[in-house]
Every structure is written in C-alpha cells, then in structure tokens.
Image: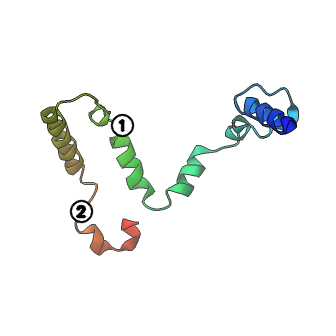
C-alpha cells in the first residue's frame, strides 16, 4: 500500500511539473499540450456553423459581457437590457433560420 501511495505521489508531482522520473514525464499533461493544435480541436468540437460561432465568441469578448459582481438589482437589470440590445443588433439569429434547414441550426 505504501508503494501505491508513493507511486501516486510521484505521478502527482509529475503532473504538477517537477518530474524526476522520466517514465512519469510522458503522463504529464504539459507534454500533451505541445502536440495539441487548438484550431483542430476547436473545429472538431464545433462542427457546425463555425463562422457564426466564431463571430459570436469574438462579439462576447466585449467589456459589456465581462462579469460584474456586486450590482444592485436595478443595475443588473439595466446591464442585462444593454447586453440583450447589443445581441439583437448583431442579428446573429432570426426566426427564419428554422425554415432554412437543420444544417444552419445545429
């Protein structure tokens, strides 16, 4: 049991960055990160409407959508209204999207 705990502790320290044992270094998440292509992963996870989703994600980076804690109820309502108005003005979605076909909605 002590060997199992020592092995788990060594593996945990390898995951946290300081692997002295080369056999544990290959299990480190950091070693996988170097081989990861973010654009390929993104296209795999977001298979449909990639252009629209990219536009929406870029739009949501605006400071208007940053979290603002500790607002009063009225401030929160005003902020929500501003956010809703901004989304509607972008015209990302339409009621007619449902008549264009399932490929556009997915």
Q: Name which residue lies at 24% across and 54% down.
A: 91
At mark 2, the secondary structure is loop
Colour pattern: rainbow
Q: Position of residue 19 (x, y in %)?
A: 80, 28
Specify the label residue 83 is tagged with.
Answer: none
Q: Position of residue 48 (x, y in %)?
A: 46, 62
Residue located beneath label 1 in the image: 61
Out of 49 and 3, give the one closest to the viewer.
3
Out of 63 and 9, give the one closest to the viewer.
9
Please tell me whether residue 66 is drawn above or below residue 47 in the rendered image: above
Out of 33 and 24, give the one closest to the viewer.
24
Q: Is residue 31 left or right of residue 90?
A: right
Residue located beneath label 2 in the image: 94
Q: Position of residue 49 (x, y in %)?
A: 42, 60
Q: Name which residue lies at 67% across and 39% down.
A: 33
> Based on the displayed image, in which of its 4 quarters is residue 94 positioned?
bottom left
Looking at the image, is mark 1 or mark 2 earlier in the sequence?
A: 1
Q: Where's the N terminus, which quadrant?
A: top right
Q: Judge the density around disc 1: few (<14), some (14-19), many (≥20) Cα neighbours within 10 Å.
A: few
> Based on the displayed image, in which of its 4 quarters is residue 22 positioned?
top right
Q: Where's the C terminus, which quadrant?
A: bottom left
Q: Name which residue lies at 33% across and 42% down.
A: 59
Looking at the image, which residue sits at the far front? 1
Q: Is residue 72 left or right of residue 32?
A: left
Q: Name which residue lies at 70% across and 42% down.
A: 35
């Amino acid at each position: 049991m002590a060997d199992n705990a020592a092995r788990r502790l060594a593996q945990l320290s390898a995951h946290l960055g300081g692997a002295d044992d080369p056999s544990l270094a290959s299990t480190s998440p950091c070693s996988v990160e170097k081989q990861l292509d973010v654009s390929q992963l993104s296209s795999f996870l977001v298979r449909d409407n990639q252009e629209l989703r990219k536009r929406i994600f870029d739009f949501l980076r605006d400071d208007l959508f940053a979290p603002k804690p500790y607002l009063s109820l009225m401030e929160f309502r005003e902020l929500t209204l501003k956010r809703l108005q901004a989304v509607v003005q972008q015209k990302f979605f339409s009621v007619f999207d449902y008549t264009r076909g399932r490929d556009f909605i997915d």
